[in-house]
Amino acid sequence: MRTVRLLLLVLGAAATAYGGWLLLPQLDAVLPWLIGGPVLHDVLVAPLVGLVGLALGRLVTDRLRLAWITAGLMASATLLLIAVPLLWRPPSAPPNPGLPDRDYPLGLAAGLAVIWAAIVIVLIVTTTEKKEP
Amino acid sequence: MIRRPRLPAPEDFTAPSHSPLVAARLGLWLGVAFGLCFATGLLSHFIQHPAGWFTWPTRPVNLYRVTQGVHVLSGVAAIPLLLAKLWSVYPRLFVRPPLRQPIRLSAHALERISVLVLVCAAFFELVTGLFNAAQSYPWGFFFPTAHYAVAWLVVGALLLHVAVKLPVARAALSTSLRRRSGLEATATGPDDRESAERRAFLRTSAGVAGIAVLATAGVTVPWLRRVSPLAWRSASGPQGIPINRTAAAARITVAPDWRLEIVWPGGRDTLSLAELAALPQRTAELPIACVEGWSASAHWTGVPVVELLRSAGAPTGRPVRITSLEADGLYAASTLPAAHAGDPLTLLALRINGEQLSPDHGYPCRLIAPSRPGVLQTKWVARLEVLR
């Protein structure tokens, strides 16, 4: 295992150095976009997720219900993130008439509605199953 | 009970999702997703900037459509997986550095730096890739070169991370998720609940990754077109195919006496549109497969490039440079490798889905070749040059 780890270390260092060298010419413009992700995540997103988790744990005591609501929130957050570049489009240089060719807000709303409808159905089915002897 | 606010410590995070058993498995999945992204991305890079040793097959005709679809969709799947992984290891952010032990401190610092590079680069690739797929550009750098360079950063930092974590990860991966501590394995207690919650977190992460893929896969998988609510592009457009660059954007004007120029070492020929249309035509179903991941097939009719060269008396079996009427622009010209130039399905198309090409689709004629990125399917062709 020691040799494998050493090999990975050397390969990893070489690939990182190559990437850094390729990036050098546009480093200034890229740097804010490189740093932005982790800063935004560690300072804002993760604490927020923790707080929502704590609050949800207090509000919903049934474990099954909590698990499904958590899953719904995770899925909704992911769909919202994917939709960001579709909803926010700074004017690009050449006109592309074929490009924003779908109703993205409607698609997002439909996706979220399907997810939450499925979760409500699952919860109703499982709670009625529980009540039946 | 009121406590003075302080920086949290790793021990403050007690949820089962922070277990190394969870982190290692998410890491493995994420490794697969990033591995697919890197391999397919590298292919796409070499197709567009071929090195001497690189060859790319012309069959199956959908090959590039599939590899680039995998590239974009594995990136989409990595978004929830990366967030789940970062949540799982978030407590490690608060590990206090071993300040009094210089050797351990430097090891700690190196590991932190490699993880920082990894997280920076991973976020960068997913965010810029997603924006590029939607053709939204809120930044000032040139996307293809930046995305390519940072891909090497991701892979390098990922290998470093695996080198550091290999013993921990191996131990975690070989431990069953249902593991219970202590000998009272039959008793149901808090540990049993923890194991259930660990599995639930992993199941949810995988499920959300699946939902993300399903929500976008319609850009390239035809039978999902009506299912995917967030596919950034439909398959429709003028004459049944979407358009990225219009004739107006490319500032194209086709002169009434337009003639196609064919040049080879020691010879030259020109053809009018009527003469092109009089040559034997071939119809083929070929996809436009864009680097942004969307793709759609159409029926193209035109003259096979290899037949055109033969009828002009030009040599075949060599690379061919295709130049557009477009004066400037990154994709005003492309080079067909010898394999593609000799393929009978590589057409100089005059018609799409039975209609004459509209100006936006490349009137008077455009290149359409199997298994190539859309940006290299040059429109408004003015000249074919057989290279040596």
Image (cartoon, coloured by chain):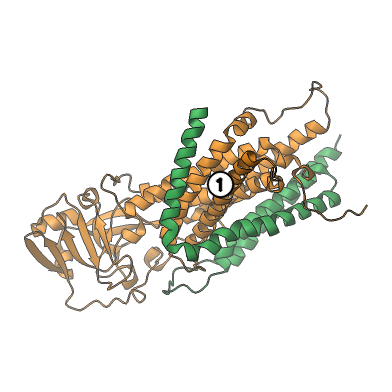
Chain colours: A green, B orange
Q: Is residue B335 above or below residue B238?
A: above
Q: Is residue B91 above or below residue B321?
A: above
Give residue B189's position: percent from left, percent from top.
Answer: 84, 30
Q: Nearer the viewer, residue B58 or B137?
A: B137
Q: Is residue B148 visible?
A: no
Residue B331 placement: quadrant: bottom left
Pointer 1: what residue? B114
Asked if residue B250 lies left or right of residue B277, the reply is right
**Total label count?**
1
Q: Is residue B230 above or below residue B85?
A: below
Asked if residue B150 lies left or right of residue A43, the reply is left
Q: Nearer the viewer, residue B46 or B375?
A: B46
Amino acid type for the residue under numbered disc 1: Ser
Which quadrant is home to the C terminus of chain B? bottom left
Residue B12 placement: quadrant: top right
Give residue B24's position: percent from left, percent from top.
Answer: 62, 37
Residue at 52% from the left image edge and 46% from the top image edge: B157
Residue at 76% from the left image edge and 27% from the top image edge: B180
Residue B188 placement: quadrant: top right
Farthest residue to the left: give it: B266
Q: Chain of mark 1?
A: B
Residue at 51% from the left image edge and 33% from the top image edge: A5
Asked if residue B321 lies left or right of residue B98, the reply is left
Give residue A40's position: percent from left, percent from top.
Answer: 64, 60
Q: How many residues crowd around disc 1 within 10 Å: few (fewer than 14), some, or many (20 or more)?
A: many
Q: Is residue B24 visible?
A: yes
Q: Helix or strand or loop: what does disc 1 sit on?
A: helix
Give residue B58's position: percent from left, percent from top.
Answer: 29, 47
Farthest residue to the right: give it: B1
Asked if residue B138 lies left or right of residue A67, the reply is left
Residue at 29% from the left image edge and 76% from the top image edge: B252
